[in-house]
Image: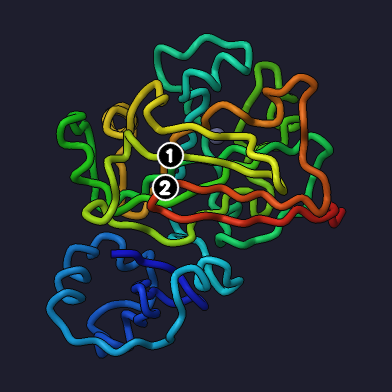
Amino acid sequence: MRIATFDQRAVIVTDDGLIDIASASGGRFSSSTDDLISRLDEVGEWYVTTDLDLSLELTPDVVARDPRLGPVVSRPSQIFGIGLNYRRHAIEMGMTPPTSPLVFTKFASSLAGANASVALPSPHTDWEAELVVVMGARARRVAPGDALHYVAGYCVGQDFSDRDLQMSGNPPQFSLGKSHENFSPLGPWLTTPDACDEPGDLLITCDVNDVRYQDSSTQDMVMDVAGLIAYLSAVCEIRPGDVIFTGSPAGVGQGHTPPVFLAPGDVVTSTIGGLGSLRNVMTRATV
Ligand code: ZN
């Protein structure tokens, strides 16, 4: 099942169109994806056992490009970002792959829909396509073997990064540099685990205009999704709707020689096999 926030309402994205969950269920379910995130098993059961009319006939390809898409969740209690979690990316940044995860946050006000435009805050703004995990249940001190049972679904994320601000502290503190307006698009929709391939074996790419800069697989992750959930939940209680940006593969702009950064007019397309694409246009800074 694919769940999206479309025109600020929770919908199921079918091959033929959208089903407005609150309307079609006669109010049994909320119109908010944030409210539904811990009830997706129930929503899925209802969806497969009920004869439902489409609210809007739109194919997934058209939906994915629609500016009415919002972030799949908008009120997470926590957003975790993981740095240097792909082996080849750690090496391109001049680091050795970490032995324990490098964890930062992206503040929730930076969340955006799949097609949000981004006003560039610095001449050194970079891209990081990432597999994003959205959690569906409370979890504390879970074992890696149980961790995936707490996942609501997976989507594509972009961890836009203002490298100037990210590296300006001594020692550097990543979170603000990754939290400018629309720096955290999530989408195009959430794919529930039953409809998703093994999260450790997904193709992930990022194109800037017509150039493919990132072309990798989640197989290159240093710590896999289950390991990350176990590691984080050993410290923080994970709550429904919480978001984990699981790190970016090799091919970010700063990893190139000479480095490449985003300019107004650039189009960043982030794609994960089976989960869809984000398309974000860069604009000139507003301040
Ligand atoms: Zn990242």
Rate crowding at label 2 as few (under 14), some (14 to 19) or many (20 or more) other CA atoms within 10 Å. some
Q: Is mark 1 within 8 Å of ligand 1?
A: no
Residue positioned 32% across, 83% down in the render: 22
Residue closest to the eye, 192 or 286: 192
Circle 1 residue = 203
In the image, is 114 to the left or to the right of 242?
right
Residue closest to the eye, 120 or 176: 120
Q: Position of residue 213 (x, y in %)?
A: 64, 35
Q: Position of residue 264 (x, y in %)?
A: 83, 51
Numbered disc 2: secondary structure: loop
Circle 2 residue = 273
* Relative vertical location of residue 13 with respect to residue 207 in this rendering, above or below: below
Residue positioned 59% across, 42% down in the render: 206
Quadrant where the N terminus sits is: bottom left
* Image-quadrant location for residue 215: top right
* Relative vertical location of residue 8 with respect to residue 250 in this rendering, above or below: below
Q: Tag 1: residue type?
A: Leu
